[in-house]
Amino acid sequence: MQHDDIDSRLGARIRAERESRGWSLTDLAERAAVSRAMIHKIERGDSSPTANLLGKLSGAFGLSMSTLLARTEASIGHLLRRDGQPLWTDPETGYVRRQVSPRSDMPLDLVEVSLPAGKEVPMPASAYAFIRQLIWVLEGDLTFIEGHVHHELRQGDCLHLGPPTDCIFRNKGERACTYAVIVLRDS
């Protein structure tokens, strides 16, 4: 999958999700607490949304960020080879998200994330309202801040997230941290 058209495909998906609900740009802006102008730029493919912004938009739709991106990226099938796994890069932090699991009717998504050294990604509680998640650290160290609770995760550690709350993924290390996110969608 090419990086060069992800912004236009993501913009089209966000517009389709909004229009399928009969919402105006103003309706979505109010529900997501995002400016109408920013949503318009994203829908046109003129701007690449940050991970935090995608979390707000997906929460407004009642979807996980993983589901929103999977609807944009993944093809249907039983096998999704590594070179065909869609990548998305947060333009603000360089965070790279790889959709590992093929799109299916299973209520589960498997995502690999690489968070660069010294970076953090805040996510709103709305991004977690319809899902349950595990975070499994594959390489490096990750500080995961869940509300007021700080979890210091090392390679091999796995954390089950609690009830939806604002959170932060933080890499305080000097090298990238790679972790898997296992998302179970509520049906």
Image (cartoon, helix red, strand yellow):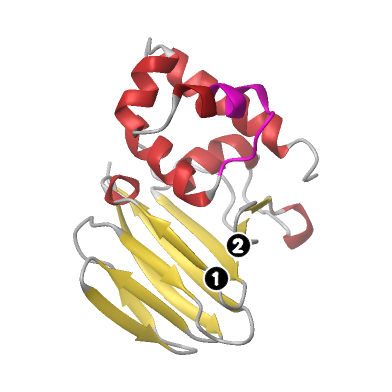
Direction from residue 142 to residue 48 in the image, left or right: right
Q: CA distance from mark 2 to mark 1?
A: 8 Å
Secondary structure of residue under mark 2: loop
Q: Nearer the viewer, residue 125 or 174?
A: 174
The residue wearing badge 2 is 95
The kind of residue tagged 2 is Tyr
Q: Which mark is residue 119?
A: 1
> Horizontal and vertical percent for residue 140?
55, 86
* Structural crowding at the residue carrying mark 1, measured as other residues with C-alpha within 10 Å and reported as few (<14), some (14–19) or many (≥20): some
Labels 2, 1: front one: 1
Q: Which residues are magenta?
A: 40-49
Quadrant occupied by the N terminus: top right
Pinpoint residue 169: horizontal percent, then vertical percent: 43, 68
Relative image position of residue 64 (x, y in whole percent): 39, 45
Identity of the residue drawn at 60% across and 62% down: 95
111 lies above or below 68 = below
In the rendered structure, the answer to whether residue 79 lies left or right of residue 105 reads right
